[in-house]
């Protein structure tokens, strides 16, 4: 960045601070970031008011000192060279400043659910909210001024918008809730279709709006690149048929999808740096492989997670998939479906587009995950014959195309290629999944 504006001051002159406290929120044309203290001290003088005026990088905005009693008075009339005098900022609405924002999504969720809502922070009639919060509120049709902020200084963050229920805040003061570790279930708010002159408008449910907002944000933030490989499925299909024959019960037949999920988990074990997340200042590598699978479509789409997939057998994965699919079965006499349950966040996502006859696709990564895998349709193709004893140069095999989307900040091209090579090896030699 070359310049920015101060959206809001969280501290005032005379306030003491410790390392990690947030002085103010700085806005650019692309993002809103917190300006954090690096040491302990006291604010002696604020040189720039919050407001729409652009401030160039390198221009001083405040003076800090170590000793409140002896040093503050020395800067009472201080102003930087060449700068116009700036009026003192208004006193903060609350005497106690907000704590530092959590550094992880899980911590942020815990903080927002355990905090009592406060009125939205405003600066000169302008609501202080993050760009993502503004975007979500606009896409969901909410008046952002009616949403209570739980961020630093009462700033509205994305989690506040996602948890906001229209009308609920006006009816009664919201009480603090207990964090259960999963997102709350959301009602389906889509109404009936509205016919127009030559068109029909279909209202979008709140769940679909949230999914759309998250995908749009992820596509903007994550530097995607894509790797594609063709995989011969003959050995996997033989192994699947053999295991299904051993099971005997046709109602419990294993599908190809279960083997591919197991192979994905095995590939993460072979290339663990792909099972990770970009956390701004660090790359977080996870110990277990938690795979989100995409189930349903439209308003019934959700992404249940299979926890620690690498330690589960093919049968266990099949049972979890069956439980996820059971939710989509019709309930009621008219075949109406209930709202999909809230989906927990895993470390990796697998999307099966092959069931629709699609050969390949380039999926959007779900933040904060670093990779997403799309599985194409199984096709009969003519491929080179690898049997040295055969007189035929070519043979017919069942082939699947798999495409891996990668976050280049976490997984570079070499690592992504290693992961896809390991996945191909597991699928073409399914007996290695038992190791």
Image (spheres, helix red, strand yellow):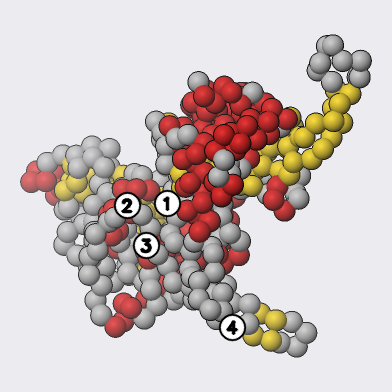
In the picture, the disc for residue 344 is: 1
How many marks overall?
4
Sooner in the amino-acid sequence: mark 4 or mark 2: 2
Residue 127 location in percent, x, y?
39, 69
N-terminal of the pair, mark 4 or mark 1, is 4
Mark 2 lies on residue? 181
Callout 4 crowding tier (Cα within 10 Å): few <14, some 14–19, many ≥20 = few
Circle 1 SS class: loop
Rendering quarter of residue 48 = bottom left
Disc 2 crowd rating (10 Å Cα; few below 14, some 14-19, many 20+) is few
Q: Is residue 143 at least partly visible in the picture?
A: yes
Q: Earlier in the sequence, mark 2 or mark 1?
A: 2
For the residues bearing labels 2 and 1, Cβ distance under 8 angstroms: yes
Which picture quadrant has residue 129? bottom left
Residue closest to the far top: 389
**15 left or right, relative to 218:** left
Mark 1 vs 3, N-terminal side: 3
Mark 4 → mark 3, Cα distance in angstroms: 24 Å
**Quick check: 11 left or right of 388?**
left
Q: Residue at x 37, y 62 (%)?
A: 184
- Residue placed at 54% from the left, 26% from the top? 433
- Disc 3 on helix, strand or loop? loop
| The residue positioned farthest toward the front in the image shown | 248
- Residue 130 image point, x, y percent: 43, 59
The residue that disc 3 covers is 184
Is residue 408 visible to us here? no
Q: At x 36% / y 44%, what residue is drawn?
A: 104
What is the number of the mark on residue 192? 4
């Amino acid at each position: 960045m070359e310049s920015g504006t101060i959206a809001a001051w969280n501290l005032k002159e005379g306030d003491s601070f410790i390392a990690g406290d947030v002085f103010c929120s700085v806005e650019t044309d692309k993002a809103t970031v917190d300006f954090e203290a690096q040491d302990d001290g006291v604010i002696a003088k604020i040189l720039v008011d919050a407001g729409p005026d652009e401030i160039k990088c390198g221009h001083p905005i405040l003076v800090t000192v170590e000793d409140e009693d002896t040093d503050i008075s020395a800067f009472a009339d201080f102003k930087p060279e060449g700068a116009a005098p700036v009026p003192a900022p208004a006193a903060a609405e609350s005497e106690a400043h907000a704590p530092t924002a959590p550094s992880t999504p899980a911590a942020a969720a815990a903080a927002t659910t355990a905090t009592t809502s406060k009125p939205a922070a405003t600066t000169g009639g302008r609501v202080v909210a993050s760009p993502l919060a503004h975007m979500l509120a606009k896409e969901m049709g909410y008046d952002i001024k009616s949403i209570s902020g739980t961020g630093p200084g009462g700033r509205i963050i994305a989690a506040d918008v996602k948890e906001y229920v229209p009308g609920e805040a006006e009816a009664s003061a919201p009480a603090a809730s207990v964090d259960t570790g999963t997102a709350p279930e959301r009602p389906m708010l889509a109404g009936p279709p509205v016919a127009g002159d030559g068109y029909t408008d279909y209202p979008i449910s709140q769940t679909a709006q949230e999914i759309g907002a998250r995908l749009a944000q992820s596509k903007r933030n994550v530097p995607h690149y894509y790797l594609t490989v063709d995989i011969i499925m003959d050995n996997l299909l033989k192994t699947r048929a053999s295991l299904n024959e051993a099971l005997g019960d046709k109602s419990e037949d294993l599908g190809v999808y279960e083997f591919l999920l197991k192979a994905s988990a095995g590939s993460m074990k072979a290339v663990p740096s792909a099972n990770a997340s970009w956390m701004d200042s660090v790359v977080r590598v996870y110990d277990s492989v938690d795979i989100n699978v995409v189930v349903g479509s439209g308003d019934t789409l959700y992404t249940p997670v299979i926890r620690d997939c690498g330690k589960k057998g093919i049968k266990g994965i099949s049972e979890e998939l069956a439980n996820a699919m059971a939710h989509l079965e019709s309930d009621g006499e008219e075949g109406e479906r209930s709202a999909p349950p809230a989906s927990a966040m895993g470390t990796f996502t697998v999307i099966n587009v092959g069931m629709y006859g699609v050969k390949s696709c380039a999926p959007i990564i779900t933040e904060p995950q670093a990779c997403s895998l799309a599985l194409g349709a199984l096709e009969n193709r003519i491929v080179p014959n690898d049997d040295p004893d055969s007189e035929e140069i070519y043979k017919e095999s069942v082939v699947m195309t798999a495409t891996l989307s990668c976050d280049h900040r976490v997984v570079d091209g070499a690592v992504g290629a290693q992961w896809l090579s390991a996945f191909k090896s597991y699928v073409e030699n399914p007996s290695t999944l038992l190791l």
